[in-house]
Every structure is written in structure tokens, then in C-alpha cells.
Amino acid sequence: MKKQDLDPQEQNLLDSYERGEWRSIKNVAEERSRLVEVARDTSRKDSRINIRLSSRDLDEIRKKAFEEGIPYQTLISSILHKYVSGRLVDRSS
């Protein structure tokens, strides 16, 4: 495969690697176990809530979820998770 055959995401990964931004992990098995546990904890759905939304907002959320190919409840959960973990970015500001 030639460098010009890479899609933008692949090119970004290659550029990052070439800039030396990647580091080896000393204990791969231990790190893998830790990340599996983090993923398990993140995906565990052990609480239920009820909220009221405007019909307009819910319709827009459903449209966005449909565009992403995911259930709207999953999209709402993802938005909330990104907010509480500080990863939700406000692009308007």
C-alpha cells in the first residue's frame, strides 16, 4: 500500500506515529486487563432514570441517533457520559 492510498484517518495515525507520539507499553497484559475492566465498568448499565424532554428535542435526538445508526437511548447515554467525563465539547464557543 502506498502512502497516497491511505484514507484521512489512516494518514492521521501514520503522521502521529512518525512524529513519535506513540509509546510502548511496559506490561501489555496488565494494561489490557485494566482497560478491559474500565470498558466493562463503562458499559455496565445498572441504573435507570426517567426524564422529561420537549417533543422537539426528542425528535432531534432520534434523528441524530438514526443518522449514527444507534438507538436514541444509547445516544443520550453517550452524551451524558461524555459530559460527566469532561469530553463533551461545545463547538459554538
Image: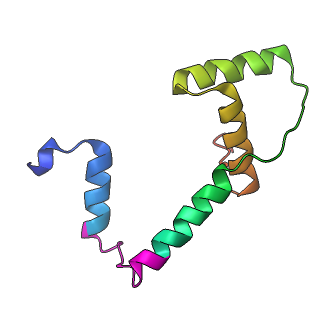
Out of 2 and 93, give the one closest to the viewer. Answer: 2
Out of 81 and 89, give the one closest to the viewer. Answer: 81
Q: Residue 87: horizontal and vertical position, in percent?
A: 65, 54
Q: Residue 77: horizontal and vertical position, in percent?
A: 72, 40
Residue shown at 73%/50% (left/top)? 83
Report which quarter residue 50 is drawn in: top right
Res 51 visible: yes
Res 87 visible: no
Q: Residue 41: horizontal and vertical position, in percent?
A: 67, 58
Q: Main secondary structure of the magenta part?
A: loop
Q: Which residues are magenta?
A: 18-30
Report which quarter residue 4 is drawn in: top left
Residue 62 located left or right of residue 10: right
Residue shown at 51%/70% (left/top)? 33
Q: Where, quadrant-wise, is the C terminus in this rendering?
A: top right
Residue shown at 31%/57% (left/top)? 13
Outermost residue, bottom direction? Answer: 26
- Against 57, residue 3 (above or below) is below
- Against 10, residue 92 (above or below) is above
